[in-house]
Image (spheres, rainbow, N blue to C red):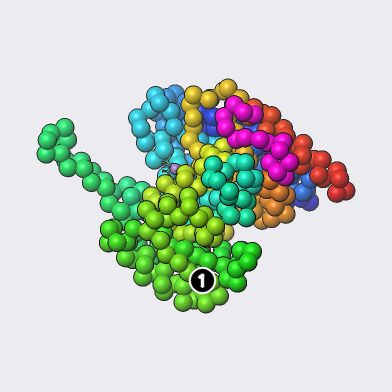
Amino acid sequence: MSKVYDIGVLPGDGIGEEVVRESLKVLDAIQSIHGFQTKREHLPYGAEHFLKTGETMPDAAFDRIRQMHAVLFGAIGDPRIEVGKLEFAIIAGMRHRLDLYVNLRPVKLYHESLCPLKGKKPEDIDILFLRENTEDAYAGVYGTTKKDTDYEIAHQSMIYTARGTERIIRHAFELAKKRGPKPGKDKPLVTLIDKANAVRAQDIWTRIFAKVAKDYPGIATDHAYIDAACMWMVKTPEWFDVCVTTNLFGDIITDLGAMLIGGMGIAASGNIHPGKVSMFEGIHGSAPKYKGTDKASPLATILAMGLMLDHIGQHEAAKELEATVAELIRAGRIRSLKAGDHKCSELGSMVRDALLERARAHR
Ligand code: IPM
Ligand code: MN
Protein backbone atom coordinates (compact mmCIF):
# COMPACT_ATOMS: atom_id res chain seq x y z
CA MET A 1 0.00 0.00 0.00
CA SER A 2 1.22 3.47 -0.77
CA LYS A 3 2.19 5.79 2.02
CA VAL A 4 -0.44 8.24 3.31
CA TYR A 5 0.55 11.58 4.81
CA ASP A 6 -1.70 13.69 7.03
CA ILE A 7 -1.50 17.25 5.78
CA GLY A 8 -3.18 20.24 7.39
CA VAL A 9 -4.25 22.84 4.84
CA LEU A 10 -4.52 26.36 6.22
CA PRO A 11 -5.19 28.87 3.41
CA GLY A 12 -5.77 31.82 5.79
CA ASP A 13 -6.48 35.30 4.43
CA GLY A 14 -6.21 37.34 1.24
CA ILE A 15 -4.46 35.51 -1.57
CA GLY A 16 -3.89 32.53 0.75
CA GLU A 17 -6.90 30.73 -0.64
CA GLU A 18 -5.86 30.84 -4.29
CA VAL A 19 -2.15 30.16 -3.84
CA VAL A 20 -2.95 27.12 -1.70
CA ARG A 21 -5.56 25.91 -4.18
CA GLU A 22 -2.97 25.98 -6.97
CA SER A 23 -0.41 24.22 -4.80
CA LEU A 24 -2.85 21.41 -4.06
CA LYS A 25 -3.47 21.06 -7.77
CA VAL A 26 0.26 20.49 -8.17
CA LEU A 27 0.32 18.14 -5.18
CA ASP A 28 -2.41 16.00 -6.82
CA ALA A 29 -0.15 15.51 -9.82
CA ILE A 30 3.05 14.90 -7.93
CA GLN A 31 1.54 12.29 -5.62
CA SER A 32 0.01 10.41 -8.53
CA ILE A 33 3.42 10.35 -10.22
CA HIS A 34 5.35 9.33 -7.11
CA GLY A 35 2.81 6.91 -5.74
CA PHE A 36 1.99 8.33 -2.35
CA GLN A 37 -1.20 9.77 -0.91
CA THR A 38 -2.20 12.68 1.27
CA LYS A 39 -5.10 12.93 3.66
CA ARG A 40 -5.86 16.63 3.76
CA GLU A 41 -7.62 18.40 6.58
CA HIS A 42 -8.84 21.93 6.09
CA LEU A 43 -7.94 24.31 8.91
CA PRO A 44 -10.34 27.26 8.70
CA TYR A 45 -8.40 29.80 10.79
CA GLY A 46 -7.86 33.38 9.72
CA ALA A 47 -9.77 36.65 9.54
CA GLU A 48 -13.18 35.31 8.41
CA HIS A 49 -13.16 32.63 11.08
CA PHE A 50 -12.15 35.16 13.71
CA LEU A 51 -14.85 37.64 12.71
CA LYS A 52 -17.46 34.87 12.76
CA THR A 53 -16.43 33.11 15.97
CA GLY A 54 -14.05 35.35 17.92
CA GLU A 55 -11.55 32.50 17.84
CA THR A 56 -7.98 32.93 16.53
CA MET A 57 -6.52 29.44 16.68
CA PRO A 58 -7.76 27.17 19.46
CA ASP A 59 -5.67 24.74 21.51
CA ALA A 60 -7.58 21.88 19.87
CA ALA A 61 -6.18 22.92 16.48
CA PHE A 62 -2.63 22.68 17.78
CA ASP A 63 -3.44 19.26 19.24
CA ARG A 64 -4.75 18.13 15.85
CA ILE A 65 -1.72 19.50 14.04
CA ARG A 66 0.63 17.65 16.39
CA GLN A 67 -0.84 14.43 14.94
CA MET A 68 -0.09 15.47 11.35
CA HIS A 69 2.98 15.23 9.15
CA ALA A 70 2.91 18.82 7.93
CA VAL A 71 0.84 21.95 7.41
CA LEU A 72 0.62 23.81 4.12
CA PHE A 73 -0.08 27.43 4.87
CA GLY A 74 -1.24 30.35 2.67
CA ALA A 75 -1.05 33.73 4.38
CA ILE A 76 -2.48 35.70 7.29
CA GLY A 77 -3.31 39.37 7.61
CA ASP A 78 -6.49 41.35 7.11
CA PRO A 79 -7.02 45.11 7.33
CA ARG A 80 -10.25 44.63 9.32
CA ILE A 81 -8.36 43.16 12.24
CA GLU A 82 -5.99 44.75 14.72
CA VAL A 83 -2.39 44.66 13.43
CA GLY A 84 -0.47 41.61 14.57
CA LYS A 85 -3.35 39.85 16.33
CA LEU A 86 -3.84 36.95 13.93
CA GLU A 87 -0.20 36.95 12.83
CA PHE A 88 0.82 36.42 16.41
CA ALA A 89 -1.83 33.82 17.22
CA ILE A 90 -1.52 31.79 14.02
CA ILE A 91 1.89 32.25 12.38
CA ALA A 92 3.95 32.90 15.49
CA GLY A 93 1.52 30.59 17.30
CA MET A 94 2.51 27.63 15.13
CA ARG A 95 6.19 28.57 15.14
CA HIS A 96 6.32 28.83 18.92
CA ARG A 97 3.82 26.23 20.09
CA LEU A 98 5.01 23.55 17.68
CA ASP A 99 8.61 24.63 18.42
CA LEU A 100 9.42 25.09 14.72
CA TYR A 101 12.84 26.53 15.46
CA VAL A 102 14.26 26.38 11.93
CA ASN A 103 12.99 28.87 9.40
CA LEU A 104 14.51 27.61 6.18
CA ARG A 105 14.48 30.23 3.42
CA PRO A 106 16.32 29.34 0.23
CA VAL A 107 17.34 32.29 -1.93
CA LYS A 108 18.03 30.72 -5.29
CA LEU A 109 18.00 32.45 -8.66
CA TYR A 110 16.49 30.34 -11.46
CA HIS A 111 17.07 32.79 -14.30
CA GLU A 112 19.03 36.02 -14.59
CA SER A 113 16.02 37.87 -15.98
CA LEU A 114 14.38 37.58 -12.54
CA CYS A 115 17.25 39.37 -10.78
CA PRO A 116 17.29 43.19 -10.59
CA LEU A 117 21.08 43.23 -10.06
CA LYS A 118 23.27 43.84 -13.09
CA GLY A 119 25.18 40.83 -14.39
CA LYS A 120 24.18 38.30 -11.70
CA LYS A 121 23.57 34.78 -12.90
CA PRO A 122 21.94 31.72 -11.27
CA GLU A 123 25.38 30.45 -10.19
CA ASP A 124 25.90 33.73 -8.28
CA ILE A 125 22.78 33.51 -6.13
CA ASP A 126 22.22 30.26 -4.29
CA ILE A 127 21.96 30.95 -0.59
CA LEU A 128 20.33 28.97 2.19
CA PHE A 129 19.11 31.21 5.00
CA LEU A 130 18.48 29.69 8.40
CA ARG A 131 16.43 32.09 10.46
CA GLU A 132 16.01 31.26 14.14
CA ASN A 133 12.26 31.05 14.51
CA THR A 134 11.20 31.03 18.17
CA GLU A 135 13.10 33.69 20.10
CA ASP A 136 14.52 37.22 19.75
CA ALA A 137 12.10 40.15 19.50
CA TYR A 138 9.40 37.60 18.62
CA ALA A 139 9.46 36.05 22.10
CA GLY A 140 6.57 38.31 23.01
CA VAL A 141 8.24 40.17 25.88
CA TYR A 142 7.21 43.78 25.40
CA GLY A 143 5.25 46.56 26.99
CA THR A 144 4.27 50.19 27.09
CA THR A 145 3.99 52.39 30.12
CA LYS A 146 2.61 55.93 30.43
CA LYS A 147 0.86 55.35 27.12
CA ASP A 148 -0.15 58.46 25.14
CA THR A 149 1.85 60.80 27.32
CA ASP A 150 5.13 62.58 26.52
CA TYR A 151 6.75 60.19 28.98
CA GLU A 152 5.63 57.04 27.22
CA ILE A 153 8.17 54.24 27.28
CA ALA A 154 7.85 51.30 24.89
CA HIS A 155 10.15 48.30 25.02
CA GLN A 156 10.51 44.86 23.50
CA SER A 157 13.16 42.35 24.52
CA MET A 158 15.47 40.47 22.21
CA ILE A 159 15.77 37.15 23.99
CA TYR A 160 18.32 34.45 23.17
CA THR A 161 18.74 31.22 25.07
CA ALA A 162 21.81 29.01 24.84
CA ARG A 163 19.65 26.06 23.78
CA GLY A 164 17.72 28.08 21.18
CA THR A 165 20.86 29.58 19.71
CA GLU A 166 22.85 26.37 19.62
CA ARG A 167 20.21 24.23 17.94
CA ILE A 168 19.73 26.57 14.97
CA ILE A 169 23.48 27.08 14.52
CA ARG A 170 24.07 23.34 14.67
CA HIS A 171 21.32 22.80 12.11
CA ALA A 172 23.02 25.30 9.79
CA PHE A 173 26.29 23.36 9.98
CA GLU A 174 24.48 20.08 9.40
CA LEU A 175 22.73 21.46 6.31
CA ALA A 176 26.00 22.89 5.01
CA LYS A 177 27.61 19.48 5.42
CA LYS A 178 24.77 17.81 3.55
CA ARG A 179 24.80 20.46 0.82
CA GLY A 180 28.55 20.24 0.24
CA PRO A 181 30.76 22.95 -1.24
CA LYS A 182 29.46 25.33 -3.87
CA PRO A 183 30.97 24.87 -7.35
CA GLY A 184 34.58 26.02 -7.35
CA LYS A 185 34.93 25.91 -3.54
CA ASP A 186 36.65 23.22 -1.52
CA LYS A 187 34.46 23.60 1.58
CA PRO A 188 30.87 24.59 2.33
CA LEU A 189 30.63 27.96 4.08
CA VAL A 190 28.44 28.99 7.03
CA THR A 191 28.14 32.71 7.68
CA LEU A 192 26.84 34.04 10.98
CA ILE A 193 24.87 37.25 10.57
CA ASP A 194 24.21 39.34 13.67
CA LYS A 195 24.66 42.79 15.16
CA ALA A 196 26.75 41.84 18.17
CA ASN A 197 28.70 45.10 17.98
CA ALA A 198 25.57 47.06 18.96
CA VAL A 199 23.20 44.45 20.39
CA ARG A 200 25.62 43.11 22.97
CA ALA A 201 23.22 40.37 24.02
CA GLN A 202 24.06 38.76 20.69
CA ASP A 203 27.50 37.97 22.02
CA ILE A 204 25.87 34.64 22.88
CA TRP A 205 25.61 33.99 19.12
CA THR A 206 29.31 34.84 18.63
CA ARG A 207 30.37 32.41 21.36
CA ILE A 208 28.07 29.54 20.48
CA PHE A 209 28.87 29.83 16.76
CA ALA A 210 32.61 29.54 17.55
CA LYS A 211 31.97 26.56 19.80
CA VAL A 212 29.79 24.67 17.29
CA ALA A 213 32.18 25.45 14.39
CA LYS A 214 34.89 23.43 16.20
CA ASP A 215 32.79 20.29 15.64
CA TYR A 216 32.82 20.88 11.86
CA PRO A 217 36.44 21.22 10.69
CA GLY A 218 35.33 20.50 7.11
CA ILE A 219 33.20 23.64 6.98
CA ALA A 220 34.51 27.17 6.46
CA THR A 221 32.99 29.97 8.55
CA ASP A 222 32.52 33.69 8.15
CA HIS A 223 30.77 36.50 9.96
CA ALA A 224 28.94 39.63 8.85
CA TYR A 225 27.03 42.27 10.76
CA ILE A 226 23.49 42.53 9.47
CA ASP A 227 23.96 46.00 7.99
CA ALA A 228 27.05 44.91 6.06
CA ALA A 229 25.36 41.63 5.10
CA CYS A 230 22.56 43.62 3.42
CA MET A 231 25.19 45.51 1.48
CA TRP A 232 27.06 42.35 0.42
CA MET A 233 23.80 40.70 -0.59
CA VAL A 234 23.34 43.37 -3.23
CA LYS A 235 27.01 43.77 -4.16
CA THR A 236 28.38 40.23 -4.07
CA PRO A 237 25.66 37.69 -3.24
CA GLU A 238 27.97 34.98 -4.58
CA TRP A 239 29.95 35.21 -1.34
CA PHE A 240 27.13 33.60 0.63
CA ASP A 241 26.38 29.91 0.95
CA VAL A 242 24.58 28.90 4.17
CA CYS A 243 23.71 31.85 6.44
CA VAL A 244 22.43 31.59 9.99
CA THR A 245 20.86 34.53 11.77
CA THR A 246 18.48 35.77 14.44
CA ASN A 247 14.73 35.84 14.04
CA LEU A 248 14.27 39.55 13.28
CA PHE A 249 17.31 39.98 11.06
CA GLY A 250 16.35 36.80 9.24
CA ASP A 251 12.88 38.20 8.62
CA ILE A 252 14.33 41.35 7.07
CA ILE A 253 17.24 40.01 5.04
CA THR A 254 15.14 37.28 3.44
CA ASP A 255 12.77 39.89 2.00
CA LEU A 256 15.86 41.46 0.45
CA GLY A 257 16.88 38.00 -0.71
CA ALA A 258 13.44 37.43 -2.24
CA MET A 259 13.84 40.54 -4.39
CA LEU A 260 17.10 39.17 -5.81
CA ILE A 261 15.36 36.08 -7.19
CA GLY A 262 12.16 37.50 -8.61
CA GLY A 263 10.24 38.86 -5.63
CA MET A 264 7.74 37.69 -3.08
CA GLY A 265 5.98 35.61 -5.71
CA ILE A 266 8.72 32.99 -5.63
CA ALA A 267 10.29 33.04 -2.16
CA ALA A 268 9.42 29.89 -0.18
CA SER A 269 9.99 28.93 3.40
CA GLY A 270 9.75 26.03 5.79
CA ASN A 271 9.07 26.40 9.50
CA ILE A 272 10.69 23.22 10.67
CA HIS A 273 11.28 21.10 13.72
CA PRO A 274 13.50 18.33 12.34
CA GLY A 275 11.68 15.02 12.58
CA LYS A 276 8.39 16.53 13.69
CA VAL A 277 5.31 18.16 12.18
CA SER A 278 6.35 21.35 10.39
CA MET A 279 4.69 24.20 8.52
CA PHE A 280 5.37 25.46 5.00
CA GLU A 281 4.49 28.83 3.45
CA GLY A 282 5.54 31.48 0.99
CA ILE A 283 7.33 34.30 2.80
CA HIS A 284 4.87 36.81 1.35
CA GLY A 285 1.87 38.22 3.17
CA SER A 286 -1.84 38.04 2.38
CA ALA A 287 -1.82 40.89 -0.21
CA PRO A 288 -5.53 41.68 0.42
CA LYS A 289 -5.81 43.86 -2.68
CA TYR A 290 -5.19 40.83 -4.90
CA LYS A 291 -7.58 38.53 -3.05
CA GLY A 292 -9.77 36.62 -5.48
CA THR A 293 -8.31 38.36 -8.54
CA ASP A 294 -6.36 35.33 -9.80
CA LYS A 295 -3.31 37.60 -10.11
CA ALA A 296 -1.00 36.48 -7.30
CA SER A 297 1.85 34.09 -8.08
CA PRO A 298 1.38 30.72 -6.39
CA LEU A 299 5.01 29.73 -7.03
CA ALA A 300 6.19 30.67 -3.52
CA THR A 301 3.61 28.33 -1.98
CA ILE A 302 4.22 25.67 -4.62
CA LEU A 303 7.95 25.73 -3.86
CA ALA A 304 7.17 25.74 -0.12
CA MET A 305 5.11 22.63 -0.79
CA GLY A 306 8.30 21.21 -2.35
CA LEU A 307 10.15 21.90 0.91
CA MET A 308 7.28 20.12 2.65
CA LEU A 309 7.69 17.06 0.43
CA ASP A 310 11.36 16.96 1.31
CA HIS A 311 10.54 17.24 4.99
CA ILE A 312 8.06 14.35 4.98
CA GLY A 313 10.57 12.14 3.18
CA GLN A 314 9.45 12.42 -0.46
CA HIS A 315 12.88 13.63 -1.54
CA GLU A 316 12.58 12.60 -5.19
CA ALA A 317 9.21 14.30 -5.54
CA ALA A 318 10.65 17.44 -3.94
CA LYS A 319 13.62 17.49 -6.32
CA GLU A 320 11.44 16.94 -9.33
CA LEU A 321 9.04 19.71 -8.38
CA GLU A 322 11.85 22.21 -7.98
CA ALA A 323 13.47 21.10 -11.23
CA THR A 324 10.15 21.45 -13.06
CA VAL A 325 9.58 25.01 -11.83
CA ALA A 326 13.20 25.90 -12.61
CA GLU A 327 12.84 24.49 -16.12
CA LEU A 328 9.63 26.44 -16.81
CA ILE A 329 11.45 29.62 -15.81
CA ARG A 330 14.60 28.80 -17.79
CA ALA A 331 12.57 28.00 -20.87
CA GLY A 332 10.92 31.41 -20.64
CA ARG A 333 7.45 29.96 -20.15
CA ILE A 334 7.24 31.72 -16.80
CA ARG A 335 8.52 35.21 -17.56
CA SER A 336 7.69 37.08 -14.39
CA LEU A 337 6.39 36.52 -10.88
CA LYS A 338 4.88 39.98 -10.55
CA ALA A 339 1.20 39.97 -9.63
CA GLY A 340 -0.90 39.94 -12.77
CA ASP A 341 1.84 39.08 -15.28
CA HIS A 342 0.57 35.49 -15.20
CA LYS A 343 -2.68 34.31 -13.72
CA CYS A 344 -2.45 32.40 -10.46
CA SER A 345 -4.44 29.51 -11.93
CA GLU A 346 -2.36 29.59 -15.12
CA LEU A 347 0.88 29.10 -13.16
CA GLY A 348 -0.60 26.27 -11.11
CA SER A 349 -1.80 24.48 -14.25
CA MET A 350 1.51 25.07 -15.99
CA VAL A 351 3.50 23.43 -13.20
CA ARG A 352 1.02 20.57 -12.93
CA ASP A 353 1.02 19.90 -16.68
CA ALA A 354 4.82 20.11 -16.90
CA LEU A 355 5.11 17.53 -14.13
CA LEU A 356 2.69 15.16 -15.87
CA GLU A 357 4.50 15.67 -19.17
CA ARG A 358 7.86 14.87 -17.60
CA ALA A 359 6.42 11.76 -16.02
CA ARG A 360 5.04 10.60 -19.38
CA ALA A 361 8.37 11.26 -21.09
CA HIS A 362 10.30 9.29 -18.47
CA ARG A 363 8.01 6.32 -18.44
C1 IPM B 1 7.27 36.39 7.83
C2 IPM B 1 6.29 37.47 8.23
C3 IPM B 1 5.96 37.35 9.70
C4 IPM B 1 7.24 37.54 10.49
C5 IPM B 1 4.88 38.35 10.18
C6 IPM B 1 3.61 38.22 9.38
C7 IPM B 1 4.60 38.20 11.65
O1 IPM B 1 6.80 38.72 7.89
O2 IPM B 1 6.92 35.21 7.96
O3 IPM B 1 8.36 36.69 7.38
O4 IPM B 1 7.63 38.67 10.84
O5 IPM B 1 7.89 36.54 10.77
MN1 MN C 1 8.69 38.65 6.81
User: Residue 18, how many percent across, how many down?
Assistant: 60, 29
Q: In this rendered view, identify the residue nearer to me: 330 or 287.
A: 330
Element at label 1: strand
| Residue extending farthest front | 119
Q: Horizontally, is 325 left or right of 69 in the view?
A: right
Residue in view at x 32 percent, y 61 percent: 196
Q: Quadrant of residue 350?
A: top right
User: Residue 118, how many percent across, how many down?
Assistant: 55, 46
Q: Image height check: is 325 above or below 159?
A: above
Q: Horizontally, is 12 left or right of 51 in the view?
A: right
Residue 246 visible (yes or no): no
Q: Horizontally, is 129 left or right of 209 in the view?
A: right
Q: Image height check: is 313 above or below 153?
A: below
Q: Is residue 332 located in the magenta-colored stretch of the structure?
A: yes
Q: Main secondary structure of the magenta part?
A: loop
Residue in view at x 17 percent, y 42 percent: 153
Q: Quadrant of residue 224?
A: bottom left
Q: In this rendered view, identify the residue nearer to me: 213 or 159.
A: 213
Q: Is residue 337 located in the magenta-colored stretch of the structure?
A: yes
Q: Circle 1 is placed at which residue position?
A: 220
Residue 224 visible (yes or no): yes
Which amino acid type is marked by label 1? Ala
Q: In this rendered view, identify the residue nearer to me: 138 or 295.
A: 295
Q: Is mark 1 within 8 Å of ligand 1?
A: no
Residue in view at x 46 percent, y 77 percent: 214
Q: Which residues are magenta?
A: 327-342
User: Residue 203, how many percent across, how many down?
Assistant: 32, 65
Q: Image height check: is 128 above or below 357?
A: below
Residue in view at x 47 percent, y 45 percent: 256
User: Residue 2, how many percent across, how many down?
Assistant: 76, 50
Q: In this rendered view, identify the residue nearer to me: 226 or 64.
A: 226
Q: Image height check: is 236 above or below 63?
A: below
